[in-house]
Image (tube, helix red, strand yellow):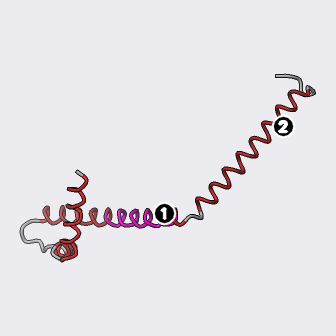
Amino acid sequence: MAPPGDARWRRKLALQVTASALAAYAGYYVVKKVANSEKVRQITTATLGYTTAALAMGEMVSRLSTDINDFLAAGEDAPVPPSIRQACRLLNTPEMGACAARLTAGVAQGV
């Protein structure tokens, strides 16, 4: 590298600092524009909704699997846990049938 007093070195340094500042400003501008767009808000909201649903589904499956294991290990005279009864009731609702039909149609359409 050239000595700090060299004019070429100072010009090159000034150009690099200017280019860095311009790139930083352009990046900031783009991030601000993208963050304020309606499409990004919709995607963010949908992603949070799907994440929440997936977490709730995971908790439900965990509880059901624990209850089923306990029920199967308990013996023949053990009562059926309320969570298993509720899951069976939910599976017999028309909404679940419609959901299963949409899911099947989506999978068939994607294949």
Q: Quadrant of residue 93?
A: bottom left
- Expressed as whole percent of the image width and height from the top left, the position of residue 77 reads 7, 71
| The image quarter in which residue 75 lies | bottom left
Determine whether the residue tagged by mark 2 lies in a helix, strand or loop: helix
Q: Is residue 53 left or right of residue 15?
A: left
Q: Quadrant of residue 58?
A: bottom left
Between 67 and 9, the one nearer to me in the picture: 9
Query: Label 2 sits on what residue type?
Result: Ala
Mark 2 crowdedness (10 Å alpha carbons): few <14, some 14-19, many ≥20: few
Which residue is depicted at the point 82% across and 34% down?
Answer: 13
What kind of residue is marked 1? Thr
Above or below, comparing residue 30 to residue 99 in the picture:
above
Decide which of tag 1 and tag 2 comes sooner along the chain: 2
Return the residue nearer the eye: 33 or 57.
33
Q: Is residue 7 above or below residue 51?
A: above
Residue closest to the far right: 5
Image quarter in which the N terminus is found: top right
Give the distance between the C-alpha atoms of the residues marked 1 and 2, in whole angstroms.
40 Å
Part of the protein shown in magenta: 41-57
The label shown at residue 44 is 1
Q: Is residue 25 above or below residue 14?
A: below
User: Which of 20/48 is in front?
Assistant: 20
Percent from the top left, x then y, of residue 101?
Answer: 19, 66
User: Who's the residue at 22% across and 75% down the image?
Assistant: 95
Q: Which residue is under mark 2?
A: 14
